Image (tube, rainbow, N blue to C red):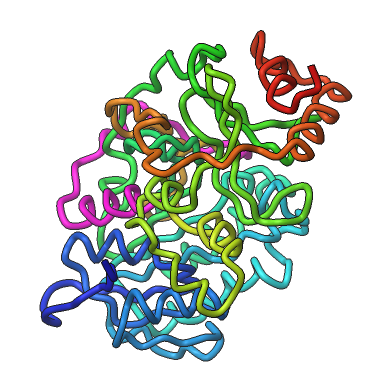
Amino acid sequence: MTHKIIQDSQSGPTVCGLFSGIGGLELGFHLNGFHSQLLCEIDPVASHVLKVRFPGIELVSDVRDVSSLRNADVLCAGFPCQNLSSSGNKIGISGTQSSLVDEIFRLLESNHPKWVVIENVRFMLHLNQGEAMRRIVDNFEQLGYNWAYRVIDSQSFGVPQRRHRVYFIASRTEDPRNVILSDDSIRPEALKDLTIEEPIGFYWTEGAYAAGLNRNAIPPLKAGSTIGIPSPPAICFPDGLVGTPDIRDAERVQGFHENWTKPAEEVAKPSIRWRLLGNSVTVNVSEWIAQKILRPIPYDASKDRPLDKKWPMAAWSIDKQRHESFSSDWPFNSRMAQISDFLRHPIKPLSVRATNGFLSRAYKGNLKYPKGFLEILSNHSGSK
């Protein structure tokens, strides 16, 4: 299957995408009847994927060359996170890549979409005392926008990946709270339990100070690692198998069709597909946002309080009056997805070298691991 985006007509609401990556935000909107007017992506490999998956749609490389949003109803922009991520260089919003968020405000001075949707890493709420969020919300308010944001875990949407991201919605004419804040549930208590009786996802590239341990789910797919390469997370199974998932299974965990990133192999090494996925947006969350824009649900703000100095997990501003929201990171009480249900292709056993590297870091660090977890890895590597 080619999985191309086919737009049968130009009727209906429209979308422009900046910093589109492989089209996670845009795909979610397309699945709800929106039509893409423009895509913008400077990475040549991601851009090639967009050309194949969104044929016939105008594609611009450099966001600084975009002068018009084509009267789109929605602007989507997952601006670069390299300077904001906890695994990045932590320079902050003034870094050469993440500062490109200012291009959004340049365009909004003369273009007025009904909605603006931004996605980025949770760490930006805390880095440099929340400098990035201050810059973003100050600019939106100066341009006359109301806004609301919320940290959301992709697991709430039925995928076995614990992935917390900030989703920020702004509008000059509508109430963004009714889009991003008005569905809410409670995180299942079962997520807190970790035993070797069920699969445990973890980062094999780490181990000393962090490992991303997850019960029946993988940690967030990411673009890089502590060893400097884009790589899949690992899974430790109760039967002693330790390995990494197939890229096609990981694509479905991120909400894409299987082989969505396959075109990347036409212009780069196959391993780069992991970086593309790590930089992308969970399509399931994007679908929900598109649905809520079409059919907003009134938000009850009666328990909210004025915003303090720190940026909370969720907040909003109407007429420049900022408040903290108590909406959780878990919009839906959906059935917990099991990582085993997503594994249609064989697991690639983790190499002895990779396993021993993790074990070495784990034994030197101060992390606590589930009873028997390190023993399974030791048996897998043959060191026991």
Q: Is residue 168 left or right of residue 99?
A: left
> Outermost residue, right direction?
364
Residue drawn at the location 78% of the way across and 56% of the way down? 89
Q: Is residue 74 left or right of residue 227?
A: left
Q: Is residue 312 above or below residue 185?
A: below
Residue drawn at the location 41% of the way across and 76% of the way down? 50
Task: Name the one closer to the observer, 191 or 71.
Answer: 191
> What is the count of numbered marks?
0
Q: Position of residue 119 (x, y in %)?
A: 47, 56
The magenta stretch spans which residues? Answer: 282-310
> Outermost residue, front direction?
382
Q: Is residue 203 above or below residue 365?
A: below
* Image quadrant in which you'd find residue 330: top left
Q: Is residue 138 visible?
A: no
Task: Name the one closer to the observer, 247 or 254.
Answer: 247
* Image quadrant in which you'd find residue 111: bottom left
